[in-house]
């Protein structure tokens, strides 16, 4: 850092470092500030005197980190960071452009708190950018999502109340392993006690969460995204098997996790899974993939694809 900075500027820089790198030691802080360790500790004390809680821990995993307090420490954004934040919010939640939306209200508070130069650009981006909702995305209840994430972090079992698309409702006792965001949807990856098997639930369909009190340990080396994708397209009534002549790397971007598991097969690849709605699978999913394919199974999906093909053929027929 420049040597002519004021103590206030260095204290603010100290705050920024501790926000982005919790556990920074006095030595590391001194290097990043370009001062001695004694001076670095003094800047930490300046933050404490200003009412910002800074905790210190000794040992190999020690260092300084911001504590939990009643006063919110200031947050500093560069212009690219501020614009990136607004873009990310609008991409995932188009309704955030509406100041009456819950997320829109929060985003407005952030934008208004930014310095004038940065805040003006962020406000213009929010006002004049138009975003279309992803038809496949679904917005879960923030409170329910927070309760699930807390249970995941605490490794405590929960009893969830779940509502299906057909508006049926039931309860399930589960060990919540992870909350995974995939293709605009939020999923709970867990172990079901009743089935003694891995299950995935859409978080937007979870209506209530209650902690059961029992603890659990998730599988070692758990890869939540990989396990989720392995299970999303499995377990439904009608099996599916679709073969593509194109390489897996080219087909993969067009495959949504609920369609099943995409595996290499010779020079091409094969999509193996299941569905509860073969007609939807054929019309909404397969019809949009720009590669030739063959439906090898099951019979219900083959019939749905044949019906769809007949409709398309009739649409370009010369017969009145």
Image (cartoon, grey):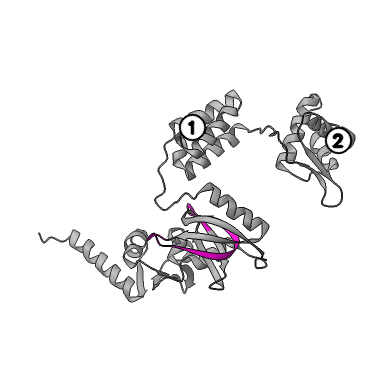
Count of numbered circles on the image: 2
- The relative height of residue 221 versus residue 7 in the rendered view (above or below) is below
Question: In the image, is residue 291 part of the stretch drawn in magenta?
Answer: no
Q: In this figure, which residue is indicated by the disc labeled 1?
A: 125
Q: In this figure, which residue is indicated by the disc labeled 2?
A: 41
Q: Earlier in the sequence, mark 2 or mark 1?
A: 2
Left or right, 240 with reference to 200: left
Q: Residue at x 41, y 53 (%)?
A: 136
Q: Residue at x 75, y 44 (%)?
A: 22
Taking the image as drawn, is residue 34 in sight?
Answer: no
Q: Nearer the viewer, residue 165 or 212?
A: 212
- Would you call the spot at circle 1 few (<14 residues within 10 Å), some (14-19), or many (20 or more)? some
Residue bounds of the magenta highlight: 164-187
Q: Residue at x 51, y 29 (%)?
A: 123
Left or right, 131 with reference to 197: left
Quadrant in which the C terminus is drawn: bottom left
Q: Position of residue 315 (x, y in %)?
A: 19, 59
Of circles 2 and 1, the one toward us is 2
Q: Position of residue 73 (x, y in %)?
A: 70, 34
Quadrant in which the N terminus is drawn: top right
């Amino acid at each position: 850092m420049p040597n002519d900075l004021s103590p206030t500027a260095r204290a603010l820089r100290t705050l920024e470092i501790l926000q982005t790198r919790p556990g920074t030691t006095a030595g590391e802080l001194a290097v990043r500030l370009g001062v001695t360790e004694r001076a670095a500790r003094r800047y930490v004390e300046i933050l404490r005197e200003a009412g910002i809680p800074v905790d210190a821990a000794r040992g190999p995993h020690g260092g300084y980190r911001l504590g939990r307090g009643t006063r919110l420490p200031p947050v500093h954004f560069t212009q690219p960071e501020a614009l990136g934040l607004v873009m990310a919010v609008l991409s995932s939640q188009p309704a955030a452009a509406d100041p009456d939306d819950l997320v829109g209200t929060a985003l407005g508070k952030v934008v208004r708190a930014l310095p004038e130069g940065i805040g003006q650009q962020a406000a213009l981006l929010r006002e004049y950018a138009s975003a279309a909702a992803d038809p496949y995305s679904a917005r879960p209840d923030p409170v329910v999502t927070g309760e699930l994430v807390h249970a995941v972090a605490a490794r405590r079992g929960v009893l969830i109340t779940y509502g299906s698309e057909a508006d049926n409702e039931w309860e399930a006792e589960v060990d919540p392993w992870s909350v995974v965001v995939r293709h605009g949807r939020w999923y709970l990856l867990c172990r079901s006690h009743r089935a003694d098997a891995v299950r995935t639930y859409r978080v937007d369909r979870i209506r209530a969460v209650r902690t059961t009190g029992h603890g659990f340990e998730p599988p070692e080396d758990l890869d939540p995204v990989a396990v989720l994708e392995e299970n999303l397209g499995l377990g439904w009534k009608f099996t599916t098997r679709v073969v593509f002549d194109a390489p897996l790397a080219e087909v993969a971007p067009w495959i949504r996790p609920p369609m099943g598991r995409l595996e290499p097969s010779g020079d091409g690849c094969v999509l193996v899974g299941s569905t509860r709605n073969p007609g939807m699978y054929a019309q909404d999913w397969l019809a949009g993939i720009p590669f030739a394919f063959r439906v090898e199974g099951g019979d219900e999906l083959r019939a749905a694809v044949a019906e769809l093909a007949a409709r398309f053929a009739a649409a370009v027929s010369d017969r009145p």
